[in-house]
Amino acid sequence: MAERDVDLFVIGAGSGGVRAARIAASYGARVMIAEEFRVGGTCVIRGCVPKKLLVYASRFADDFEDAAGFGWSVEKPVFHWPTLIANKDREIDRLEAAYKSTLERFKVELVKSRAIFEDGHTVRLTASGACVRARNILIATGAWPHYGPKIPGLEHVISSNEALHLEELPRRIVIQGGGYIAVEFACIFAGLGSKVTLVYRGENILRGFDDDVREHLRNEMRTRGITVTCGHTVTAIDKQGDEFVTHLSDQTQIAADKVMFAIGRRPNVMGLGLDKIGVKIHEHGGIEVDAYSQTSVPHIYAVGDVTNRVNLTPVAIREGHAFADTVFGNKPTRVDHADVPTAVFSEPEVGVIGLTEAQAREQLEVVDVYKTSFRPMKATLSGRQTRSFMKILVDGISGRVVGCHLVGPDAGELIQLLGVAVKMGATKADLDATMAVHPTAAEELVTMREKAMTWRRQAAE
Ligand code: NDP
């Protein structure tokens, strides 16, 4: 027997769930949201935000070194990991409090509990055993690190969750994975002074990104002293005293103080009772939803990483907002998942939008490729060995820009703005017509006149 009735019950107070709850409440809905860990979810508590704070910390090492070429003498800087972690934790506490006060302001009732389905309209709060009946239910439970097949010594492996709370900076770390998290944490630890070995099973890191970007970043990471080992996996981890010996599939071994896996994240669908209410799971492991985030049960919706569509915070927020507009605002809204700009906060940074060259060749008849690689101006005096890379892909028939791929300082900031132009359907002629801002790196985007090549589909293809 349910003890409460609400219009909307949200399971999970991360980016998508909180946005959906507050927008639904702003339309007058009675909303309750359950969270078993901390309010803010992956992005705020153990993802984007704390990670970016560590990225900032890791970049100071270069700044101190680079300053010498500009006439500064800096005494040997000393880094103190516990100070960084304590300051980062304080900022995360502040953000969590801000999220809670937003929920309060919109009169969304927060319950600190795991919530599981009793039946299609009822959830049970495991903390108190109370049941809540809801007209609509939104599942926004996110995803959780996955550790791959059981290998000997897997219990010694940490994920990015624990990496954000280590008591001390590891002197040596082995990171397995070649995606966003592995690459970002490899660069963070290397910047802070750890000896980093990245182990990736495929041919090259960042599968799914443009091949030129992958090659450029891998070379930059190597120049920065990161060992990037491709074509291998970790097969076992041996604890020997205070260190861990990591065994690789090529029979080599690496001694390290920490071993971290970043080999993907799995949607949090387990233990919610979804099977008994008929919510279908897609073959990719996420909850199956339509363009309005509606599941196979009409009054149950799902947004964010639990749906395994485009697993990025801003996408989850949009999906949560669109759900609330659709169901409570009488404004049916679909989220456009095409041309989502994204950044990898590696060193140097990567920013991309649209098609890779390989995708453009699959989808178009003619592809014009513009690309450039150059030494950033700051490196001329600092003497740092680094190059930036920019690539623009253009539909050779319509002239429309279909992909932009940047590697270099502030690539994340640049791609956010360039993303507006691409989303609006900018052509290469529009970029050419835009006056350059000089001297900047971004001016290359409007001054690339010479095509690197034109690819044409052959009649036989
Ligand atoms: P990704 O899916 O990006 O990468 C997973 C990596 O692990 C791939 O390189 C994959 O290899 C490899 N892998 C998978 N299974 C195994 C296995 N069994 N053994 C060895 N290697 C394996 O996952 P992440 O964990 O890096 O990130 C999770 C999600 O978080 C991403 O989808 C991303 O959307 C999001 N994210 C976004 C960030 C941002 O916007 N800056 C930052 C961090 C995370 P292969 O390529 O061969 O499949």
Image (cartoon, grey):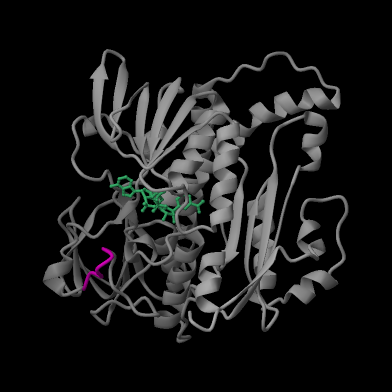
When the figure is inspected, residue 184 is found, relative to residue 333, above or below; the finding is above
Q: How many marks?
A: 0
Quarter holding the N terminus? bottom left
Residue at 51% across / 62% down in the picture? 314
Task: Give the residue at the far front of this rendering.
Answer: 460
Left or right: 185 in relation to 419: left
Residue at 59% across / 64% down in the picture? 353
In the image, 374 versus 315, the foreground residue is: 374
Q: Which residues are magenta?
A: 280-285
Left or right: 54 in relation to 302: right
Residue at 19% across / 57% down in the picture? 270
List x then y, in percent, for residue 170: 43, 22
**Residue 244: within the magenta?**
no
List x then y, in percent, for residue 371: 70, 59
Give the quarter of the image for residue 319.
bottom left
List x then y, in percent, for residue 33: 34, 61
List x then y, in percent, for residue 76: 68, 14
Residue 71 seen in the current view: yes
Secondary structure of the magenta portion, mostly? loop
In the image, 159 versus 210, the foreground residue is: 210
When the figure is inspected, residue 106 is found, relative to residue 232, above or below; the finding is below
